[in-house]
Image: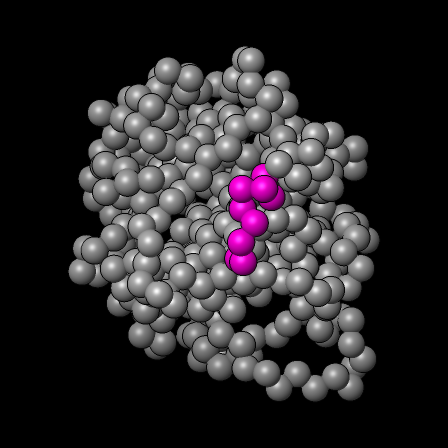
Amino acid sequence: MKDFSLINHLYAKYFDFTNPPSRVTVAVGDAMPDALDIMLTTIAHPLPPPGRRNGLHVQSQSYWAPANIGPYSQAISVPLAYGHEVHIAGQIPLDPPSMALYTKDGFKGEALLALQHLTRIGRTQNVKWWVAGVAMIPASTGSGTDQEERVTLAQAVWNAVNRPPYADGGEGEDDENEEVVDAWDRKNFSKAFDDTVERARVPDYRIFGEYDGEVSTASSGLRAPPCVVVEVDALPRYASIEWACTGLAVDGLQQVHTGVGGDSGNSRNDQSGAFEVRDPDDRFAYIVYEILGDGEVDVAKLPFTVEYGTLYASSRLDWKDSSLVQGGVSWIPCKRVWGQGGRELGGVLVAKRG
């Protein structure tokens, strides 16, 4: 992290145009491969038709969302077969008006504020679904909260914000008509503040065929986007959490759940090893795949093909000689990785399927 300013200066020489790429930046410490001081991986899309690549660059301080503090965009949206894939910059808990780290409410409050930034930015890009929520936490924050507790809190915050309507098994009528409340507005404006702005839901479960606004998700089996937590060495501004997510601005998806190791079937077990969303017409699909063991990752043994993606690899995983990495998948060398339900894993692959 001490080299961040220098790297930013060099990076800006290559990305000096309007709406440069969005990015996620972390320090991985001794998890970095030997003889390397920096790693840079990119996702490069074919040049879309004019006007179809959209970017969001927040240049001024406000109460709405953090301003860009480097040569990057808060979001870049590129076309899919239909709709858009939205890459959002890593979000840390900055207080938008002051651009200072927000620490008043502990780790839970920090995780929630950073997640609110993500939701607000996603809403501007018409995001209807998150491929996955990836919460990055530093190895030590000095706050006295152990890592397992931070993992639990991060996943609880993610699930609370992104849970399906009527996830508690109710009839759903009240949830369907409930307004989307902006908690930050309510906290920072007077009680007389009249919030009349209609806000789109993120995520929006109406994009799934099983959900028609009347049938409870308890019976349809819909699940919230998966949440992965990874431990790295340090984060920008030495923050306690950074959310890294890719959104989908589409009007229709299907959910597919498979068991650990790629077992066939539509398991709805919370400990399932893979979570997939796909276009109903099979034009694209995204998968979050849990890797349980600590051996080498063999791309030939995966039950699917990968177009591109990111492997979050723990120190337990033999990724250095992996055919998966050699096949063009980006990877983040992490210290530890946790999947659904707080289960510690060898790694997690978040990918667009081929």
Which residue is depicted at the point 68% across and 59% down? 67
Q: Judge whether 296 appears above or below 333 on screen.
A: above
Where is 90 relative to 163, above or below? above
Q: Position of residue 105 (x, y in %)?
A: 78, 53
Query: Looking at the image, which residue sits at the far left?
Result: 281
Looking at this view, is 103 or 56 the one in front? 56
Number of disc labels: 0
Range shown magenta: 11-19
In the rendered image, the quadrant that contains the C terminus is: top left
Q: Quadrant of residue 293?
A: top left
Q: Is residue 198 left or right of residue 144?
A: left
Location of residue 267 in the rendering, given as x and y in whole percent from the top left corner: 28, 45
Residue 275 at least partly seen: no
Q: Residue at x 35, y 77 (%)?
A: 214
Q: Nearer the viewer, residue 144 or 253?
A: 253
Q: Nearer the viewer, residue 224 or 33?
A: 33
Q: Is residue 150 above or below residue 261?
A: below
Query: Residue 53's spot in the image, x, y percent?
Result: 40, 61
Q: Where's residue 197, x and y in %? A: 59, 83
Image quarter hosting the N terminus? top right
Name the colouring of the figure. Answer: one colour
Tell me if residue 307 is in the magenta stretch: no
Q: Residue at x 52, y 17 (%)?
A: 33
Q: Does the segment drawn in magenta span residue 16?
A: yes
Compared to residue 85, the image places residue 215 above or below, namely below
Q: Is residue 97 visible?
A: yes
* Residue located 38% across and 58% down the image: 78
Left or right of 86, for residue 261? left
